Image (cartoon, rainbow, N blue to C red):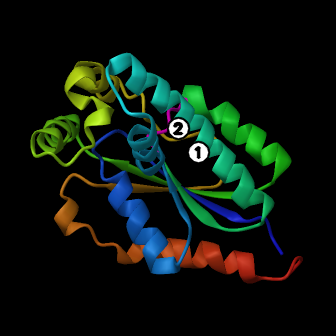
């Protein structure tokens, strides 16, 4: 059996990562380890009071993301890992994972023009579609600066990169993405050396 496939769905906030990850996981019956799911579970368990506490939960969530990735890679399972990974901050953690459990990354990088992302970011908060523990209303200016400065680029971890323009989410043709995932998953089913 070849190294397991790790489908990494990443990109800036409000780029549609969570929706894309859910679609891929649902279509192919894969575990979906996602940042907001972990973070909101921690908020519901521990509560939230302010921006500082939200930042601490965010840091704990990153540690848990990589812990769950470690567990699934140890089991040789393909899965989806979704978060707004930052290359400078998160590449070392992916390299450490690869040293322990060689995996084949398929990186789905979601992105859209900054003005779309900013509008979506504010819109989802104002519509009440975000857990209040995220404190988006308190962190918005920092997030917007990070989006505009390109902090959420493609990870330099090898493997295949699939770039997905999510500017007009309703018009995305998912067929090529699904085919890329299908082909990559087929590699998991080939015997070694085939």
Q: Residue 45: x, y in percent?
A: 44, 41
Task: Name the residue rendered at 14%, 45% in the picture.
Answer: 128
Q: Is residue 116 left or right of residue 87?
A: left
Identify which residue, 100 or 47, lies in the foreground: 47
Residue ID for mark 1:
65
**Relative image position of residue 60 (x, y in whole percent):** 55, 32
Relative to 52, is 70 on the left or the right? right
- The image shows residue 146 at horizontal and vertical percentages of 34, 24
Horizontal arrangement in the rendering, residue 193 relative to residue 174 (left or right): right
The magenta segment = 83-87
Residue 84, magenta (yes or no): yes
* 131 or 159: nearer the viewer: 131
- Circle 1 packing at 10 Å, graded few (<14), some (14-19), many (20+), is some
- Tally the numbered discs: 2
What residue would you read off at disc 2?
61
Verify CB contact (< 8 Å) between mark 2 and mark 1.
yes
Mark 1 falls on what kind of element?
helix
Q: Which mark is residue 186?
A: none
Q: Is residue 158 visible?
A: no
Mark 2 → mark 1, Cα distance in angstroms: 6 Å
């Amino acid at each position: 059996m070849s190294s397991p496939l790790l489908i990494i769905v990443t990109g800036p906030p409000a780029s549609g990562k969570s929706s894309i990850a859910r679609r891929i996981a649902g279509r192919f019956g894969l575990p979906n380890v996602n940042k907001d799911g972990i973070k909101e579970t921690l908020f519901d368990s521990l509560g939230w009071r302010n921006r500082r506490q939200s930042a601490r939960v965010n840091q704990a969530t990153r540690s848990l993301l990589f812990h769950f990735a470690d567990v699934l890679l140890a089991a040789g399972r393909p899965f989806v890992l979704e978060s707004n990974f930052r290359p400078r901050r998160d590449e070392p953690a992916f390299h450490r994972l690869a040293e322990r459990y060689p995996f084949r990354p398929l990186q789905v990088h979601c992105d859209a023009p900054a003005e779309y992302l900013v509008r979506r970011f504010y819109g989802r908060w104002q519509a009440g579609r975000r857990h209040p523990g995220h404190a988006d209303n308190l962190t918005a200016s920092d997030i917007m600066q990070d989006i505009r400065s390109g902090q959420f680029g493609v990870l330099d971890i090898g493997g295949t990169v699939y770039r997905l323009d999510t500017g007009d989410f309703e018009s995305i043709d998912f067929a090529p993405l699904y085919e890329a995932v299908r082909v990559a998953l087929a590699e998991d089913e080939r015997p070694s050396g085939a």
